[in-house]
Amino acid sequence: MLCEWITKKIRCTQLDETDHKILALLKENARIPLSHISQEIGLSSPSIKDRIEKMESTGVIQGYKPVIDYSQLGLGITAFVRLTLQYPVCCQENIADVIKEIPEVVEGHYTDGDEDMLLKVVTESPRSLRDTLNNINMIPGVAYTKATISLDNPIRAS
């Protein structure tokens, strides 16, 4: 099923069906041994290794990262923070570089629509979320923020 999703959603002209199957297996478990991929796909381990290295060198595979459960680290509050930026103040320095320095911000995107950025923030409590939002609002170029607290994460991407 995962392979079908990858095949439908990320069809790249440079990748063939075998590459998509390899990606599906790596997406499910990035630490899967080459020998297991080889058995699943029906190619030799060196051939699988070459295909993976090609996908790494072309930027299809950009890294292998752990999936972190922040609640296990005492960070039980996850919020999505929408930022509206004040132009041109926000553009005088790269606002993303300033926001990257805030440890509670674990992900950020520039967006289209009513807001300009979307941040994923993890904190230990509502009070620490409030403090983080205050820190973000103090950044020159941030006009205002809107936060939505996540109650649960039933759909996780790997």
Image (cartoon, rainbow, N blue to C red):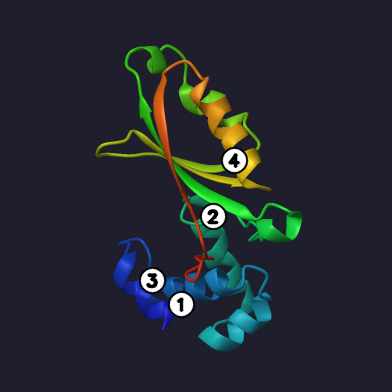
> Residue 35 falls in which quadrant of the image?
bottom right
Instruction: Name the amino acid type tagged 2.
Output: Glu
Q: Judge depth for marks 4 and 2 and give the one in front.
A: 4
Which element type, helix, strand or loop, lies under badge 4?
Answer: helix
Dot 2: what SS?
helix
Other residues around mark 4 within 10 Å, as few (<14) / some (14–19) / many (≥20): many
Please say if the residues under marks 1 and 2 sit with CB atoms less than 8 Å apart: no
Tell me how far mark 1 sits from mark 3, CA to CA.
Answer: 8 Å
Q: Quadrant of the N terminus?
A: bottom left
Q: Using the rendered image of the protein, determine whether residue 86 is visible from the camera's viewpoint.
A: yes
Q: CA distance from mark 4 to mark 3?
A: 35 Å
Question: With respect to residue 112, does 98 lie above or below?
Answer: above
Q: Amino acid at mark 1?
A: Lys
- Residue appearing at x 73%, y 61% in the figure: 72
Of label 4 and label 2, which has the lower sequence position?
Answer: 2
Q: Which residue is mark 3?
A: 6
Of the residues shown, which amino acid type is indicated by label 3? Answer: Ile
Name the residue rendered at 47%, 51% in the picture: 58
Q: Which residue is mark 4?
A: 129
